[in-house]
Image (spheres, rainbow, N blue to C red):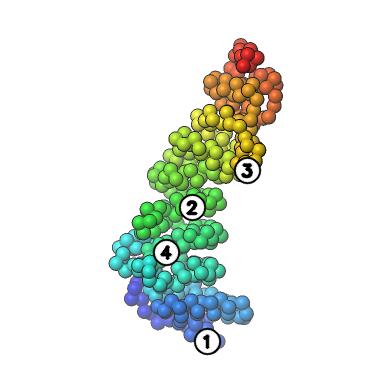
Amino acid sequence: MEVADRFFNEKRPQIGNGIRSYGWLESQIDCLFCSDTIKSKQALHHILGYYEQADPDILFDLDVFLQSDWARRSAVARWNLFPDFDQVVDNQKCLQSEQEHPDVASCCAYESPGAFQFLIRQGIIRPCYYNSFGHSLFLLAFQENAIETMKYMISTMSPIHLIAPASVAEMWDGRSILQLAATNAVVFCICWEKVDQMQLDLRETLQEGEIRSICRFARMGLASRLYQRGINLADVVKKDSSLWLEMIRYHSEPTSLFDWLWMNNCLPPQDFLLFHPDPDSALDWLLANNFPLPYAGRGQEFLWKFAIRCGRLDAAHWLSFDRVAPSQLANRETIFESPAGKQHAILEHKMY
């Protein structure tokens, strides 16, 4: 485990093999790894500009230097960073208040995403680090909605870091990186791929709020994998029928998740059968195009209810998403358990 050494003061090694002179560049590096945030930021931007015009051989030497242990340990010591959450907890007395000037890494995250990505990709700072306020660097990228940065950070982090709290601040209520990732489909899927490898009980890693967010993008495959680890989306949907509307409104392909919910005995509320669309409402337009059941004729509505009573969820699904006339529905053998049941439905349909 990496340990923050606040007294790290090892002499800076030279850049390259000593054949070339790097006078100006070395002075910028000395400024970069100092305790003065303003000087460090200025030096970082000078170095970034240098990358655009320098000779490839020089850039190779510079890359090797910036990716060295010395550069990383200097950043931790000079910028008051912490390698992991445990060390943040152990050193809370060293944390700055939010009113103080932030460290270089935090400034870059808020003001210069390109510079922030440069620091991470060079390995000068690691995605699992926490800043001088006790926030994880991932949280900084999350606050700026830097999707590409978050994807890269998660791809290089170990699973154990993904379920650690993203901040010691009370306002974040101990939420983990995994929980924060639940607001974005791509970021969460990358995160879950890594967390799913852990031989741990993951049932408590996601709370109801995150599961609501996941319902806006999860498909059958992801829902099944979560279920296998003790996280059942259907339990949350059953508690709050408004989630059906949210899924239709935000999910790009809700039918896949609907299939999974129905297979797990989670059915849409009766309100969906009685809903009448407003032609001027964008939400109602989405409903009509993604969930045609509420707009079916009374005959289809009855047959759907009958299929549910018979326990034929496959029939309910077919009735919901295959837009065919009620007279055709009664001819499908898959709808009812027996010919007698089918005939009974036809008779009741005529009386309905």
Mark 3–mark 4 CB contact (< 8 Å)? no
Identify which residue, 231 or 238, lies in the foreground.
238
Q: Nearer the viewer, mark 2 or mark 1?
A: 2
In the image, what residue type sits under mark 1?
A: Trp
Residue behind mark 4:
129
Q: Secondary structure at mark 3?
A: helix
Q: CA distance from mark 2 to mark 4?
A: 17 Å
In the image, what residue type sits under mark 3?
A: Ala
| Residue at position x 53%, y 51% in the image | 184
Graded by Cα atoms within 10 Å as few (under 14), some (14 to 19) or many (20 or more), the crowding at tag 3 reads few
Mark 1 or 4 closer to N-term? 1
Q: Position of residue 317 (x, y in %)?
A: 60, 29
In the image, residue 89 sits, relative to residue 20, either above or below, namely: above
Residue behind mark 3:
282
Graded by Cα atoms within 10 Å as few (under 14), some (14 to 19) or many (20 or more), the crowding at tag 4 reads many
In the image, what residue type sits under mark 4?
A: Tyr
Q: CA distance from mark 2 to mark 1?
A: 41 Å
Mark 3 or 1 closer to N-term? 1
